[in-house]
Image (cartoon, rainbow, N blue to C red):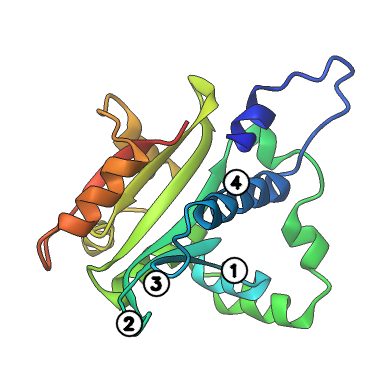
Amino acid sequence: MRTQEYLIFKDPENKLHPSPKVLTQVFLMTCITQSINLNIPDTFNCTAMTPEQRILLGVDWVWALLEKPSKNPKIQIAVRVLHLPEWEGSGESSATLEASSDSIQIAQMESSNKSMCERMVNFCTSIGKDCYALFLFFGKKDDKQNIYGVLSNNFGAAIGKCSNIDRAFIENFVKGSKFDTPQKMMQAIVSRKKSENLTLVIKFS
């Protein structure tokens, strides 16, 4: 995957520092291109969020499995990308670049009492069990070269128990876990019984 190539790449002159925004867009465009190559846009589509939506909902994009022939979303996966701290600090952040927009400032004020992770969990919970939160880790502390994901339709239970939905909370799922493939992730989602809770840890690269 192209995103992994950026994570692995070592610039001998130390001049290449792709921003988190660029890495996120490369991953997303790779997924969109692959879905087009497989001729599945009619059954599986992707909606990228606007800057305002990303702030208000905590979501970078939403994957949806569509019903036929209506093409209404049957299952949705809201995705939030989490970068390594050193990547988060590289380049000019998207928030800084977009800060001059009035709509961005309003969105920031409206959502300032919750973390980005909590906003996404609340968004998924408001839709129901057929909407999953997927947190993508572009590298982790002990493995900076691979992409991992934690997917669940039950993060809302943690909020009910007053747990903080933050990076540390989500990373705990990855520690010592057995990793599923993206294919097994989709199979588990499609075969899940109605109202059943599902939590998976996935290795994407």
Q: Circle 2 sits on which residue?
A: 69
| Label located before the other in sequence (3 or 2) | 2
| Label located before the other in sequence (4 or 1) | 4
Badge 2: how crowded within 10 Å, few (<14), some, or many (20+)?
A: few
Which of label 4 and label 2 is nearer to you? Answer: 2
Q: As rendered, which of 93 and 111 lies closer to the eye? A: 93
Distance between the alpha carbons at the discs numbered 3 and 2: 26 Å
| Label located before the other in sequence (4 or 3) | 4
Residue 193 to residue 33: above or below:
below
| Label located before the other in sequence (3 or 1) | 1
Side of 131 where 14 appears, left or right: right
Distance between the alpha carbons at the discs numbered 2 and 1: 33 Å
Q: Circle 3 sits on which residue?
A: 123
Disc assigned to residue 78: none
Residue found at x 77% / y 38%: 18
**Which amino acid is tagged 4?**
Phe
Image quadrant holding the N terminus, namely top right
Return the x and y of residue 52 as percentages of the image width and height. 64, 75
Distance between the alpha carbons at the discs numbered 4 and 2: 29 Å
